[in-house]
Image (tube, grey):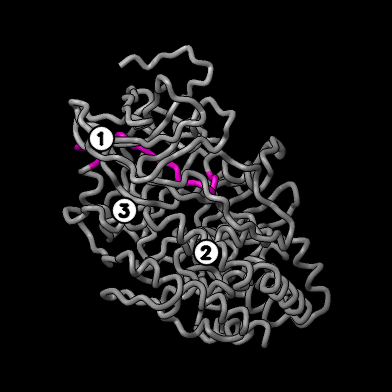
Amino acid sequence: MDLESNDPEDVTYNVVGFPDTDGGSFGVLIDGKITKLSTSPDTFPLWSGTAPGASVASNYQYVKLSKQGTLLTQEPFLRSLQNGSAKSTVNEFFLRQVTQTALPELPQVFDDVRPKPSKAFDHSQIATIHLTPDPNKFADMVADPVKNKDSIMAGFRFISANNTYSVNRVKLKISGRDTRPFKKLSLRIKFDNGETFFNRPIIKMRSGVFDPTMIREKLYIDILNAVGVRTTQGAWVRVYVNGNPYGFYLMVEDIEPPFLRETMHHGNIQPMKLGSLYKCCDTRPIPPEDEATLQFAGSKTTDYNENVYENQNFGASPTNDPMAQLILFLQDLHNYDPTLPGGEAFWNSRLDLDGFLRCMAMEYLGGNLDAYWYSGNNYFMYFNPTEARWQFIPTDFDSIFSDDNHSDVLTTFMKFAESRLTRPGKDHPLVTKLIFRDKDINARFKQILLGIVNGVFNPEVLEPRISAYEKMITDEVKWDYLLERSNNPGKTFDFTIEDFHNGITGSVKRGDFESKQGIKPWIQGREAYCNQG
């Protein structure tokens, strides 16, 4: 069918869709007439075309067609152009009625330190990522995810409402640690040297296998942004591999030197040389278990476990002594006497103190069981040469808002800080010395904590956002939970769409998974607890 027309009101229709069979296609249905849309290897799975006789006022539906052009599936709702003067639809997704969601805004409690908005991370919509690796190499990669650390090459295409981004070669590998034993795997995508994805050279697809709602991590990032914490950004995406559905994921950026330039230095070319960067994590489940406590263990790099403190950018540290700069900080912390006056000034000259205290307030409020305060895990230490002090960067937020059964977080922050002192060799001195023992920093922490609770971490502010997310991703989560993964190695909790809804308002028990509180009750309880204390 001829798709060309000289009518000045002609509209170009754009839909993302994956045919059921080879040769299948998509079309647009207007006034009872189907017009077939077209795609190409350079645009698939985006289908586009104009419909003769249609105008900006025409209602329309997308349809899925067989190879012979027979109608297979018709959208059960009518669409209309949201912009009456537009000559083209945005890139819409087949059977998804709402392309862009107007979300309730969160108040900015402290200074907004986010990098400039990125086309990659628009949280008002769900983009599509299509990966095209060699099928056999991909099958080999996912066959033994616990052991396989190798990368394979793949084509990459990202399609959002207003943007497309394609490259022929990215490095694709399995990501994460705790999620590797699961059927739904997390993925890591690295773009070739000189190539970036909207200034993000590395992105991760986080599977959310420990959260039946798939909302917790995204909400936590939102709140970190609202309280002025520098961290990774994230947005939801659908992922397909070689035309086949693979899952609903939270796409986040990875913390490596390019992240520092964009987020810690606001995209500036200065400083020319970035500072020291350390990835800090525990060693679970590899014995002997160790944590990134920030305790001083000696003056040499060899005194520290390289799997706990991993240098990812040397900065001022020599290549043969990569821990050198961080060791100076650990020594200051070790020698610090919190009973002496002047603690705030002392630490502000060495550390972005308010930024760190906001991170700790959020770890406490969110019940973050897999971060510095509780586990000595999932954070980075960066020496910012522009400010000549350290910055604490939190990451990977998959153990928050009571998604586990640890009752010891359900206490005052002072008792929780004190509890870190009861474990032999596992003191977390940035918490115990600063927040617990230094009265001035303790007072500042209380001020920040209450500012966060009264400003954003409360039901009045967060529940509308949570409800909007619930509505926005219900169909995506249902789609994900119904995907056929029986041939994948690994385990699954077999969450259902009922678990998704229950995880927001109440408890979820599924096999050996149990979450005793939903997101909303957790926030309600935390707000009440802090305001009472």
State the residue position of label 1: 19
Determine the secondary structure under disc 2.
helix
In screen coordinates, is 150 left or right of 125? left
Residues in magenta, as a range: 121-138
The answer to whether any part of residue 297 appears in the image is no
The residue at 43%/55% (across/down) is: 473
Which quadrant of the structure image shows residue 359? bottom right
State the residue position of label 2: 466
Which quadrant of the structure image shows residue 128? top left
Indicate the position of residue 356 as horizontal and vertical percent values: 66, 65
Q: Compute the Cα span from label 2 to label 1.
A: 33 Å
The residue at 56%/86% (across/down) is: 411
Marker disc for residue 479: 3
Which quadrant of the structure image shows residue 284? bottom left
**For marks 2 and 1 on the same chain, the one whose residue lies earlier in the sequence:** 1
- What amino acid type should be assigned to the residue bearing mark 2? Ile
